[in-house]
Amino acid sequence: MNLYESVFVFSGNLTEKLANDKIKHYEEIIKKSGGNTIKKEYWGLRTLAYKIKKNLKGHYFLLNFETKYDAIKEVESKLKIDEESLRFLNLSIKEVSKEPSMILKKYNEDK
């Protein structure tokens, strides 16, 4: 099992609840493969730098999880066909930071 850090951006046309449901769906795929989510952060509805699929805003999520490479490939293939998925990035990492990310700290300050 490897550690991964992933950032997901979903359409701003979704409600926060629907965006959370989408991320839970991808967490279930990871869980079914024997992996587990270590850290999950919702960075909020943020303005995009440029339009993506006619969207000016997107719901941002950060996930740190431990899983097999096959589960990552399955998640990526499903994200590619999901119309509400605007962007995603999966990185293999050596360890998960225990602290909240800088973006989450800024998001919580702005609330």
Image: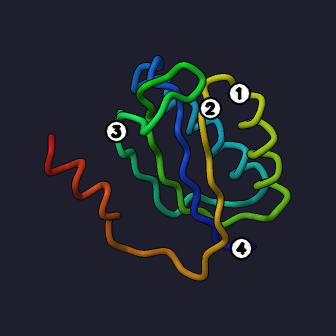
Asked which colour scheme the image uses, the reply is rainbow
Q: Position of residue 15 (x, y in %)?
A: 41, 20
Count of labels shown? 4
Q: Which residue is mark 2?
A: 85
Mark 4 vs mark 3: which is more N-terminal? 4
Numbered mark located on residue 2 in the image: 4
Instruction: Report if the CB atoms under discs 4 and 3 are less than 8 Å apart.
Output: no
Mark 3 vs mark 2: which is more N-terminal? 3
Of labels 4 and 2, the one closer to you: 2
Distance Cα–Cα, label 3 vs label 1: 20 Å
Distance Cα–Cα, label 4 vs label 2: 24 Å
Numbered mark located on residue 105 in the image: none
Q: Which residue is mark 3?
A: 44
For the residue labelled by badge 3, is the local secondary structure a helix, a strand or a loop? strand
Amino acid at circle 4: Asn
Residue beneath the point at 76% across and 46% down: 76
Numbered mark located on residue 82 in the image: 1
Instruction: Report if the CB atoms under discs 4 and 1 are less than 8 Å apart.
Output: no
Distance Cα–Cα, label 4 vs label 3: 27 Å
Amino acid at circle 2: Ser
**In which quadrant of the rendered image does the N terminus lie?**
bottom right
For the residue labelled by badge 2, is the local secondary structure a helix, a strand or a loop? strand
Mark 3 vs mark 1: which is more N-terminal? 3
Mark 4 vs mark 1: which is more N-terminal? 4
For the residue labelled by badge 1, is the local secondary structure a helix, a strand or a loop? loop
Distance Cα–Cα, label 4 vs label 1: 25 Å
